Amino acid sequence: MTIPIDGFLEAVVRGATPLAFAALGELVAERSGVINLGLEGAIVCGALASLVATVAFGPSAGLLAGGSAGLCIGLIFAFFVLVLRAQQIIVGAAVSILGLGLSATVHRALTGGGASAIHVATLPELRIPFLADIPIIGPALFSQSLPTYILYALFPLVAYALYRTIGGVVLRAAGEHPPAVIAAGHSPAKVQFMALCVCGFLAGVGGATLVVAQTGTFSDGMSAGRGFIAVAVVALGRWRPVGVLLGVLLFGSASALQFLAQSLGWNVPYNIVLAAPYVLTLLAMAALRGSGSAPAALGRALNRSASLV
Amino acid sequence: MIGRSRPLQLLSLTVVVVAALSLVSLTIALAGFDVSTAARAALDGAFGGSFAIFSATLKRTTPLLFLGVAVAVAFRAGVLNIGAEGQFLAGAAAAAAVGLHAPVESAVMMLPLEFAAAATAGMGWAAIAAWLKARFGVTEVVSTLLLNFVAINAVGFLVRGPLQEPTFTYPQTLPLGESARLPLLVDSQRLHWGFVIALLVAIGAWWVFQNTAAGFRARISGISRSAAESAGLIAVGRVQASALLASGAIAGIAGFSEVAGVTYRLYEGLSPGYGYTAIAVALLGRLHPIGIIASAVLFGALGSGADSMQRNAGIPAEFASVLAAVILLGVLALPAAEALLARKFRVARAL
Amino acid sequence: MTSIPPILELRAIEKRYGRTIALADGSLAVRAGTIHVLLGENGAGKTTLLRVAAGLLAPDSGEVLLDGIPVTWNSGAQAIEAGVGAVQQHSSLVPSMTVAENVALTERRYFRRFSPTAAARRVRVIAEAAGLNVVPDAVVGRLSVAAQQKAEIVKALAHEPRILILDEPTAVLSPADARDLFGWLKTFVSSEQRAVIVITHRIREALEHGDTITVLRTGRTVLSANAGVRTQSEVLDAILGEQPSIGSGGSVKPSPAGTLPAEPCLVIDNVCVADSSGNFRLKNASVSVFPGEIVGVAGVEGAGQHELLRVLAGRLVPTSGDVSFPESVGFVPEDRLRDALIEELSLLENFALRGAGARSGFLSWKSVAQETTAAIKGYAVLGGTEVATVAELSGGNQQRFVLARELGVSPIAVVAENPSRGLDVRAAIAVFDQFRAARAAGAAVVVFSTDIDELLGIADRIFVCHAGQVRAVPRDAVSIGAAMVGL
């Protein structure tokens, strides 16, 4: 039996796309010193908002609406972490619960509790002439829908912004040693606020991608832990854009196992395939041990202790 | 941080709960529902009569109480265990497996066996995270979270495979036999002895923190790692790993209590996110046993009230988790709000 | 001198934090072309005053005048704009970034391109113009403390300040590096319309290098004069106020000869400590401490004394080498609120902290309470019963409480790191008296201090750390100073 390698690669890229948006957002947030575990809520709210906007205005509006919803969730997180200086991890968990509950409630209200789920047409595949004909990797890279192509621009853009702009230097400094940023006359909280806005927006777009580019519908908790995986992937990728790219591809491969199992006719229990991405992420985190290059001030609120009570 | 008085704490927590409830009522009203009908339905569902209290509210309180204590044990030691959900499922699966297959006849033998299996499984599930941290430096926040998703799928696998009922029609196990079930606490009500165990665990955990050397070490490790290591010569890593294991064991017992006391079988979706709500339970209870008992009852009532609202007023029950999140955020906002109030107060006094 | 207004003047500055008054009446007038030295004890308000001058802190009342014109700054950025550059006491550099990246932080426009080569060129230009030797591509965390300070000055110079403020720049420097720094500062102010403000607690240094001195005591300016017309003892009087009876630095009390037992009580032999990246923090260190003596340790920051003290106290397991110490060694760390005490807990619980790692079974709070009460009485810890929290005590009493816990009734061995940090002179004297008492009771005592005079006043023998190496040094200031820079 031949392994359908190009089909597998296509599934890898498709699976990686929504996560890539969220992970890039988390990268920006974590480099500024804030660990945003509320990403899960931003993704799922972005997904629902994009569904509603797509019904009304079409899929491009869906992507934008998803980003905006994610931004709103990001703002809630930013308010508690930057203004009230509450513990980042717990606020993140709370915001995730909030996003999951909110989206489920609104979805239930919209569908009236019946089984009639809302469906929308998904974005078409855009085949790029010639490039898509490259053997093996051509279809995987150049026969995808719009969000994937946005990512091709976004990765270099984020890398450029982080390493080749003054704002990027200030942002990374805020994640490493906030007193230096203050001494230089900047406000770390302001930089972190902007980073969290970017983070929320991108996570929302990631959620929207799930709907408008992949499933065409919404289900409760459809983010399926991608927000948490994004946090893991950023650590896996050593807080660098290239590393994050490799991390999301790893996740994409795990999620494409489902495709592989189906097309090869393996009789692997469905749940084992579903659990693969989480297990693989954990294994990868263990294999690439240590956190040597984590931003030094990551997760620490500026001038209040991290005490819970 | 210093000397916030008990009454003031209680007052501010009450304010948070009331504010969250009003916020959510407002949302319900804006969504076009009749608030008074909804409120009546909720109150009826939560406290209206002995059925509501024992078979709905306190039955729901039980897992939240266990899991709230589990989360609090970890948090007090400075371990952010966000994996109570997964540890709960591990315990539930172990209890179901033992309850269905252990070659034991009498309940006197069977229940302790289930209990031990569930505690061990919950502890084992937490041990993965503890090991990943000790051996590979993987932060427990991420590992416990990811393990929740693994646990959900593991339960899915079990109820479709090794533990599936013999007709292979439904993704669930056979019901447990009589001897494998926890006896009911009140005649003809759903409340079972798990509730009493939960109360004992809450008080017991608190006693351990207050009166034993190990508990003191855990408490210190949770407040100041540097002082614990330097002044107390405490091996903080080991203490925190033990706390995570204890937390996992308690969460596992919660799984036993739910399977042997309420559902009598294992199936997917056994937990409607109890492990996450438990974070709100623990923090609203200020990690203190009496507080946790009170907040577990509150969240139990919210759950049964929400169910009733869905039945009688057509409001989606999912909003209960929104309410939990809003209350949790309110609790997190408290220190800042109190500091603000204290400053205002001082200024007012100075004038 | 009266016609031209001072280049920078602070008038009657007041600053409170809650109930504590950091500054009651701080004043400072800096003339152009001078090095102005600010002196005072810890907690006298020096740093607060400088933070006000640098726009990092808004005063509750009082005026800041630049060239005689009142100014109000709401952020450090505005002060920088106005030509005031500050070099902080604790590094304001990002350790994981290069010097060039750190200097680039001072730019305002976020969307501007950052080019590492252009940034490096800029650093080179500034450093050359100022006559400072700085490598732009070096990662700050790998530089020596003196080199970091130069990088820090370059960062401040990026804005072309007229007034440069340095907070305790010499505290982390060896005597030679400190001389270099003052030499450079002299050239800096030699060009017209510039001035430097330096905080230090070393009186000799202030009188030697400063043009003008200002002394703060308990939040008030108590002396302002030309450096040339003041003697050390006059300045000391101003710093301390009403002079307590001290033999500070003077009374040398060697341990009674011949009474030392043959067996040392704390021994480390050929000990090495490597950090996570494999660099040796401590190399082949051997030290023996006998019962009934006080061993003094000196060293500039990062010279290895941090590790040495922790190995001696059994708080750090060395990478290699042999150690032997008694069952329980008391430890008085430098940062007591981080490493010794937990502010929000009661004295009772803090007392129970000692030995918590080895205890098993149940805790008897009743007996701990008795011990705590006895310790509070025995060491005259003021303001605390056993149920009071640590936060309710003053700094001096917190330190007394730490000593009470770590020395206990019959101390065997104790290691102390800069035990007088943050204490006023009277409290510091009381602390050193406790160590003398412990020595008399037969304890082995190890004390590290940044103040050589303090060491000479208490220690029987002196060890100096330099670049991870430890060696015994004769008991005189010249030998110690030379050993600290590796001579």
Image: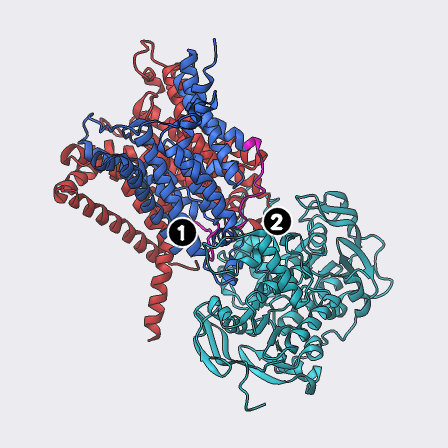
Q: Which quadrant of the figure contains the C terminus of chain B?
A: bottom left
Q: Compared with residue C240, is residue B289 higher up or lower down, i.e. above or below?
A: above
Q: Is residue B88 visible?
A: yes
Q: Position of residue C187 (x, y in %)?
A: 68, 74
Q: Is A139 placed above or below C113 here?
A: above
Indicate the colour of chain B. Answer: red
- Say whether residue B103 is visible: no
Tell me the amino acid under the disc marked 1: Met
**What residue is shown with label 2?**
C355
Residue at coordinates 28% horizontally, 52% vertically from top-left? B14
Instruction: Report the side of C239 relative to C268 (left or right).
Output: left
Q: Nearer the viewer, mark 2 or mark 1?
A: 1
Determine the residue positioned at 23% across, 49% down.
B23
Residue A194 — which label? 1
Which chain is represented by cyan in the image? C
Which portion, as a residue range, is magenta?
A286-309
Residue C380: image location, x then y, percent = 59, 68
Magenta region includes residue A300: yes
What residue sits 46% from the left and 25% below the top? A253
> Circle 1 — which element?
helix
Q: Amino acid at mark 2?
A: Gly
- Say which of C440 and C276 sits in front: C276
Asked whether residue B183 is drawn in magenta, I would say: no
The hue used for chain A is blue
